[in-house]
Image: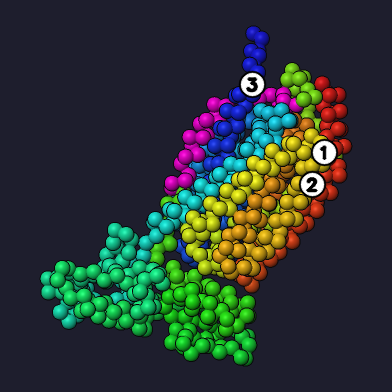
């Protein structure tokens, strides 16, 4: 029986397929980037070093890259829509499972499995889009497809921030150690009845004062509340039954918090080491003599209590020594979270992981386009005839100069941008005075909108300019990276909130112009039958040599020096990548001409 001829795929169906692929790619980046706001929580939960955090990020990236290579070969020979659906299925299950991990090794393995799922999917993504759309619409389609990276990033960052904020709770066991009283102990006219968590996730110390309830409710430091001026340790609300004299209540609560603050308890001691060799003029300010202690012989710096932003600023001015600066920032971070639970990060994966299963099902149902069927120099029947030939010539992959130079330029650029993205929230929390959840909700949406606009504009502008100049894609990439670098430096160095937000938003807007033109060029200068393989090799190289090792290197440099020090090399790497993209543009027109001659010759 003759084989049934496949019905041609209409442009209308191609746009539907693009919608499905955007949903899948959105799920991809949600599960990939939702770990960002949780990084500092994971550090505390697993008691991990920055180097270990880097390896968690690296586990995902290395497995993702290694799996991509065989999947690329398989995709060029099989049904790519199947691999897209399978990948989405694997990463969604693995991401959800991450929330149940109780050990560092378990979480490491779960993140590696997420990388495996994305590695199964990745080679087929842009290759499918290229075969759904003709070349004159391809950059726009691929830019829309790549915008899912930002839509997914936005959802991951914002939703993760909201989840962390809404599930933030005190550690009742540690909070119980703060009180100097025992359950049932008589204190004046009152009896201590223990503590409980309130409906708004605060901690209430409860007393019975002659049949009248009295509660001292403790929350985080908030300088907008007058009570902070009295306690310096917690913001305090005073609640009691009707008829309780307010003055008496305030006096009792103030006495209670004063007793708590003055306790000589190891649970209030926060110590960091490796501070030997401070300069001889190093002296502690008198106002911190009762809170900050430095043991020069042992090289230990200890701070008692909760460090406020004003305390941090004053203490950082004592010495510019990098080791001291890192120690004070570390103490500030630890003290801020010491009395709070660190396991609420699990809800991020429980909530954001499962939706990908729906998109996996949609992918399995997509129609497979003919490889090369949308090229303007081939008819669909000619493309089908070429695909029917069993033998594949892989030599164009290393004989196309623009392709080789662009791939290695992107290795360098991806190392920088990947390292920046992965360590962004720990950097903001440690150096910009904002918790990850706060930064995710306040800065995240601004940055993501800026990048989304950049990605979409890059595709539209690139398609327009490419008609006049075949090197237009490369010049756009070069100019935008060059313009974005100064803004990245401003973000790293500035302490002003508006400058921080403005610099990272404008910087990422400019850098986002790389994605659409670069991915369009990669699939346009190689034979249609080699696109998935080329994507796989590209993914392998940019991740194994780029953003796979870069988070680990940043983590190591952070442990040895500081995270700010580790960030300073990133703009330099971006500049090197930009120069490489510009050089690649020299070869693009000739490589496109050779491809057309090669394909028409085969037809």
Q: Which residue is mark 1?
A: 469
Q: Is residue 417 visible to the viewer in this orientation of the structure?
A: yes
Separation of disc 2 and disc 1 at Cα? 10 Å
User: Crowding near pointer 2: few (<14 within 10 Å), some, many (20+)?
Assistant: many
Instruction: Name the side, left or right, on which 515 lies relative to 303.
Output: right
Q: Are marks 3 and 1 in contact (CB under 8 Å)?
A: no
Residue at point 18%, 76% (across, down): 245
Q: Which residue is mark 2?
A: 475
In the picture as drawn, the residue positioned furthest to the top comes out as: 1
Closer to the N terminus: mark 2 or mark 3? Answer: 3
Residue at point 73%, 36% (across, down): 463
Q: Which residues are magenta?
A: 350-375
Residue at point 75%, 33% (across, down): 530
Above or below, 143 relative to 506: above
Separation of disc 2 and disc 3 at Cα? 34 Å
Which quadrant would the C terminus be assigned to in this image? top right
- The quarter of the picture where residue 432 lies is bottom right
Closer to the N terminus: mark 3 or mark 1? Answer: 3
Separation of disc 3 and disc 1 at Cα? 30 Å
- The quarter of the picture where residue 22 lies is top right
Closer to the N terminus: mark 2 or mark 1? Answer: 1
Q: Are marks 2 and 3 in contact (CB under 8 Å)?
A: no
Q: Magenta segment: does it hold 358?
A: yes
Instruction: Name the side, left or right, on which 29 lies relative to 143.
Output: left
User: Crowding near pointer 1: few (<14 within 10 Å), some, many (20+)?
Assistant: few
Residue 479 or 330: which is nearer the viewer?
479
Above or below, 415 relative to 388: below
Residue 102 or 155: which is nearer the viewer?
155
Residue at point 86%, 33% (across, down): 594
């Amino acid at each position: 029986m003759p084989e049934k001829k496949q019905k041609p795929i209409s442009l209308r169906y191609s746009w539907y397929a693009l919608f499905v692929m955007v949903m899948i790619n959105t799920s991809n980046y949600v599960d990939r980037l939702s770990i960002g706001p949780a990084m500092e929580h994971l550090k505390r939960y697993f008691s991990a070093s920055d180097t270990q955090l880097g390896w968690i990020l690296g586990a995902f990236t290395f497995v993702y890259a290694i799996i991509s290579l065989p999947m690329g070969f398989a995709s060029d020979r099989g049904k790519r829509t199947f691999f897209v659906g399978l990948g989405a299925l694997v990463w969604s299950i693995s991401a959800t499972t991450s929330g149940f991990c109780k050990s560092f090794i378990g979480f490491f393995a779960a993140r590696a499995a997420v990388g495996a799922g994305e590695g199964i999917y990745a080679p087929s993504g842009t290759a499918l889009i290229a075969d759904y759309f003709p070349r004159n619409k391809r950059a726009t389609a691929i830019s829309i497809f790549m915008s899912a990276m930002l839509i997914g990033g936005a959802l991951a960052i914002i939703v993760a921030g909201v989840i962390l904020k809404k599930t933030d709770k005190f550690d009742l066991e540690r909070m119980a150690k703060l009180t100097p009283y025992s359950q049932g102990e008589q204190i004046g006219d009152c009896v201590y009845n223990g503590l409980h968590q309130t409906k708004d996730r605060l901690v209430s110390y409860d007393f019975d004062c002659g049949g009248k309830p009295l509660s001292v409710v403790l929350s985080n430091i908030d300088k907008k509340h007058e009570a902070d001026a009295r306690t310096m340790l917690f913001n305090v609300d005073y609640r009691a039954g009707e008829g309780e004299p307010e003055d008496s209540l305030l006096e009792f609560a103030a006495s209670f918090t004063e007793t708590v603050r003055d306790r000589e308890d190891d649970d209030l001691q926060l110590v960091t080491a490796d501070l030997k060799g401070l300069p001889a003029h190093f002296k502690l300010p008198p106002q911190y003599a009762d809170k900050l202690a430095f043991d020069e012989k042992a090289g230990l710096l200890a701070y008692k209590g909760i460090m406020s932003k004003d305390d941090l600023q004053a203490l950082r001015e004592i010495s510019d020594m990098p080791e001291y600066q890192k120690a004070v920032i570390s103490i500030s971070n630890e003290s801020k979270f010491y009395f709070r639970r660190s396991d609420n990060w699990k809800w991020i994966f429980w909530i954001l992981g499962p939706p990908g299963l729906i998109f996996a099902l949609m992918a399995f149902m997509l129609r497979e386009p003919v490889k090369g069927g949308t090229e303007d120099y081939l008819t669909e029947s000619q493309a089908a005839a070429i695909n029917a030939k069993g033998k594949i010539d892989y030599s164009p992959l290393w004989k196309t100069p623009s392709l080789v130079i662009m791939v290695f330029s992107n290795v360098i650029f991806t190392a920088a941008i990947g390292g920046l993205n992965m360590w962004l929230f720990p950097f903001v929390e440690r150096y910009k005075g904002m918790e990850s959840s706060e930064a995710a909700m306040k800065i995240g949406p601004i940055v993501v909108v800026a990048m989304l606009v950049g990605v979409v504009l890059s595709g539209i502008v690139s398609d327009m300019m490419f008609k006049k100049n075949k090197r237009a894609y490369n010049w756009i990439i070069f100019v935008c990276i060059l313009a974005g670098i100064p803004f990245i430096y401003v973000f790293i160095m500035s302490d002003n909130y508006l400058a921080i937000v403005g610099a990272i938003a404008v910087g990422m807007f400019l850098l986002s112009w790389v994605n659409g033109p670069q991915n369009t060029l990669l699939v346009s200068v190689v034979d249609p039958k080699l696109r998935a393989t080329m994507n796989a090799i590209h993914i392998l190289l940019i991740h194994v040599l780029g953003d796979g090792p870069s988070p680990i290197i940043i983590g190591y440099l952070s442990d040895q020096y500081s995270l700010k020090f580790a960030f300073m090399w990133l703009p330099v790497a971006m500049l090197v990548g930009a120069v490489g993209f510009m050089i690649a543009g020299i070869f693009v027109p000739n490589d496109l001409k050779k491809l057309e001659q090669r394909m028409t010759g085969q037809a």
